[in-house]
Image: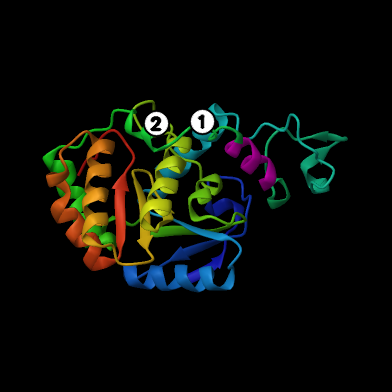
């Protein structure tokens, strides 16, 4: 495994928080060991790793950021922003340094005030047998779905669900948007202790910080049935895998393809 500071040419995004480029990971367990190490070393921040299809995930993140005006500088105090963000006294017009992350965060959080888990459920996501099989497979064997290149971001936010600010994703109209992903992640954290740790082109990854009791597992099944417009019984096997493995991967896109 190789871990190096992320360089601009290694990412399709501007680097707005401390980030690292990871290659040659040999197992999902190895990735989680890296995640836990960085989490331990940055207790006041949130660690987010990229998951599946890095190129597509960055592409949709760029467009999601732009379409939701998350990079607008209007109304923000730029006095503490790095000098390199200006040219002839004028801001460059886009966010390009960690000194500007606060702009992205504030723009994001302003737009989640009226968004909650029910909003995400109302998006109209569905799941068929093939997609469910994919979800069960990634929860059983996540390593098969990871991109060979992974970026780890140290996002300067306290709560795990706020990590979406560091990698806003959900661009297509039939997918959950960044704010609905945030609401989903917040709901799962506050109700079940499931902490967002990863965002990909199709999946969100959550790690469990405690074992769920029988009632909680049943309630989680109901929540998933509401999210995907299905019956709770459909998720029994998925939740059995989750209880065994200690993490949960969910899709936030309209359709999963093999």
Q: Secondary structure at mark 2?
A: helix
The first of marks 2 and 1 along the sequence is 1
Which quadrant holds residue 41?
bottom right
Which quadrant holds residue 46?
bottom right
Residue extending farthest right: 89
Which quadrant holds residue 6?
bottom right
Q: Position of residue 42 (x, y in %)?
A: 59, 68
Assess disc 2: are there few (<14), some (14-19) or many (≥20) residues with their C-alpha within 10 Å of its C-alpha: some
Magenta part mainly helix, strand or loop? helix
Q: Indicate the quadrant containing the N terminus: top left, top right, bottom left or bottom right.
A: bottom left
Q: Is any part of residue 138 visible from this angle?
A: no
Along the line of sight, which residue is nearer the eye, 211 or 36? 211
| Mark carried by residue 114 | 1
Q: Which span of residues is magenta-colored? A: 101-109
Identified at 43% across, 65% down, the residue is: 23
Looking at the image, residue 29 lies above or below residue 203:
below
Q: Is any part of residue 215 visible from this angle?
A: yes
Residue at image mark 2: 119
Q: Is residue 55 left or right of residue 71?
A: left
Along the line of sight, which residue is nearer the eye, 1 or 77? 77
Give the Cα separation between the discs numbered 2 and 1.
9 Å
Q: Secondary structure at mark 1?
A: loop
Q: Position of residue 257 (x, y in %)?
A: 22, 40
| Mark carried by residue 171 | none
Q: Position of residue 85 (x, y in %)?
A: 77, 43
Q: Position of residue 249 (x, y in %)?
A: 30, 53
Along the line of sight, which residue is nearer the eye, 144 or 169? 169
- C-beta proximity under 8 Å, tags 2 and 1: yes
Assess disc 1: are there few (<14), some (14-19) or many (≥20) residues with their C-alpha within 10 Å of its C-alpha: few
Residue extending farthest front: 215
Looking at the image, residue 5 lies above or below residue 191:
below
């Amino acid at each position: 495994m190789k871990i190096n500071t992320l360089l601009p040419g290694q990412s399709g995004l501007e680097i707005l928080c401390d980030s690292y480029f990871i290659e040659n990971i040999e197992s999902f367990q190895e990735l989680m060991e890296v995640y836990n190490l960085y989490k331990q070393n940055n207790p006041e921040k949130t660690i987010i790793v990229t998951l599946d299809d890095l190129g597509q995930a960055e592409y949709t993140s760029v467009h999601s950021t732009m379409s939701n005006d998350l990079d607008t500088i209007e109304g923000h105090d730029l006095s503490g922003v790095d000098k390199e963000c200006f040219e002839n006294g004028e801001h460059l017009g886009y966010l390009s340094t960690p000194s500007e992350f606060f702009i992205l965060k504030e723009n994001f959080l302003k737009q989640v005030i009226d968004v909650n888990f029910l909003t995400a459920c109302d998006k109209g996501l569905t799941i068929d047998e093939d997609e469910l099989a994919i979800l069960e497979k990634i929860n059983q064997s996540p390593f098969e779905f990871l991109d060979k290149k992974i970026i780890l971001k140290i996002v300067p936010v306290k709560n795990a669900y706020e990590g979406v600010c560091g990698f806003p994703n959900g661009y297509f109209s039939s997918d959950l948007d960044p704010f609905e992903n945030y609401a989903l992640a917040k709901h799962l954290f506050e109700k079940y202790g499931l902490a967002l740790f990863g965002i990909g082109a199709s999946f969100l990854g959550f790690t469990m910080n405690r074992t769920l009791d029988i009632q909680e597992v049943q309630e989680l099944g109901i929540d998933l049935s509401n999210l995907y417009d299905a019956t709770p019984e459909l998720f029994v096997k998925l939740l059995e895998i989750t209880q065994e493995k200690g993490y949960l991967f969910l899709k936030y896109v309209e359709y999963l393809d093999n």
